[in-house]
Amino acid sequence: MHGSLARAAVAGEINACKYLVVRDFSADPYGIAKELRTQASVRGFVVVSAVSEVPQADVLKTCVMNGSWSRDLGGGELSVRVVDAPSDALVAEAAASGSRFGGVASTVRFLVKKIYSQLGYTGYSDDVNRQRISREYPPRPQLAITEDEIKKGEARNPIEGIWTDPEDHYRLGIVPAPAGSHADYVAVVLQSNSPVWQPNEIKAEIRSTANSNIFTCTYFMGDKKPAGTTLTFEHNSMLHGSAATPKGPFDLLLIRVWPKVSEESASVGSASGVAGSGFLLSRSGLIATNWHVVAEGKNISIAFPGWSKAVSAEVVVRDVVNDLAVLRVTDATKLASTCPDLPFQLASSNGVTLGEHVSTIGYPLTSMLGSNPKFSEGVVSSKSGWQDDPRSLQISAQVQPGSSGSPLFDSDGNVIGVVVATLDAGKVYQLASAIPQNVNFAIKADYLLSLTSMLPGTSLGSRTTGFSPEKASQCVAIIRAW
């Protein structure tokens, strides 16, 4: 390309560029990038310093110019490439060399003028832009459907409905896939603020797995390139996955818009054969948990780590208002070799401080993560709970469905609370257009101490060994109610 006209990717496509970002050169002692910006503005480009300055609706009208300068005895050579901002696809390129009497500044202006002459920009054209979009982003298969039709239909799976991304770029309808499709469900564009995506185009192809909360998915990105991911269905209101793309990992999150989720913040107990957690209070077989874990069950079973078979249990005392329950296993002899040394004990939460380190052990998402106990840690985010509820602590330790009833430990291994709930991310997004991060709650242990005092002739176990997550996990049980 030395000293000659560079060939553009497609003749005249430079006129698809309304906005132009001119990036700085790695070596630019003569201020060439600055001159490129100056002359770009004169020639009709809207010059911006970054793509983020461009309105979202105009990103496909934005191009990026990268350049390089090399010095030689005859003056130097200037080369530039203009690419499409979203896809990095080549739009045009040019190169010019030589020198001009009058010094460096004159030579720079001379070379930049040659560059723009080669690029052939005559001004932004909507027609050229549309032609480029249709070539770079070909139409996807379509399924004609409306929001009203989705709302009138009968869902066969909880993921069916109307969804949006957190930035509200797309409004998608997830419906059964058309006959003959290799997918079980498809996500159809209902609304989009991107000129690339049109209503009724299929943006994702979703396939079921043996787990009702896990799906495999081919998701078509903003540039219509496919990316494979695994979606998890969370809190009855979110689909979450991560995909690898040429530009790096992409975090995919969809929020349910319709049908509406519960008006209350979600409990961390799971439905359909409720599974939760509980922890040993005494060698006589007393187990603490949340009331909501066992409230709907006629049958209750408990199993500690290493057990091949669960044993039954019954509720001996409950506190519905504070969501607490104490269970007793029907066969305490099974505890003979379980948790031989108790590494924790109940303690008042009066001395808890803001920012204090806490941890918990329980059985979250057993259908996906398995039936071994899981440890997580965080801090006390607030000494009160939801809407300043004085009965609870707000914590940042990770909590998922199945964590209900887990013990909350302080740094000394005292049980200062019982994990009870996490905010429903989908509901919070509907109310506040924000997704909560690790906003979880635990009932203060004082209420459990008060509840156990109602059991006549019962003494709670005292700590018999130093605390460690490994030892403590042997004293935390998985609870199922049905």
Image (cartoon, grey):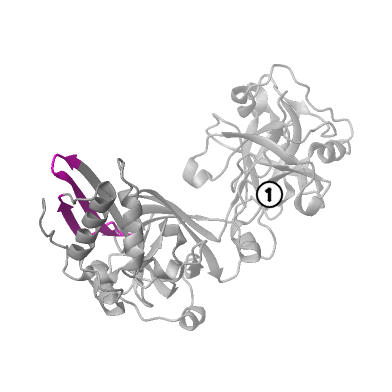
Which amino acid is tagged 1?
Ala
Q: Does residue 434 appear in the picture of this structure?
A: yes
Residue placed at 63% from the left, 62% from the top?
427
Residue identified by numbered label 1: 421
Expressed as whole percent of the image width and height from the top left, the position of residue 154 reads: 49, 77
Q: Which is more toward the observer, 405 or 125?
A: 125
Residue 358 magenta-highlighted: no
What secondary structure prevails in the magenta region?
strand
Extreme residue in the top direction: 465
> Residue 369 in the image: x percent, y percent?
49, 41
Q: Residue at point 23% right, 63% down?
A: 116
Image position of 82 with respect to 326: above or below? below
Provide residue 172's location: percent of width, then percent of height.
Answer: 44, 70
78 left or right of 373 in image: left
> Quadrant of the rendered structure where residue 180 is?
bottom left
Which quadrant holds residue 415?
top right
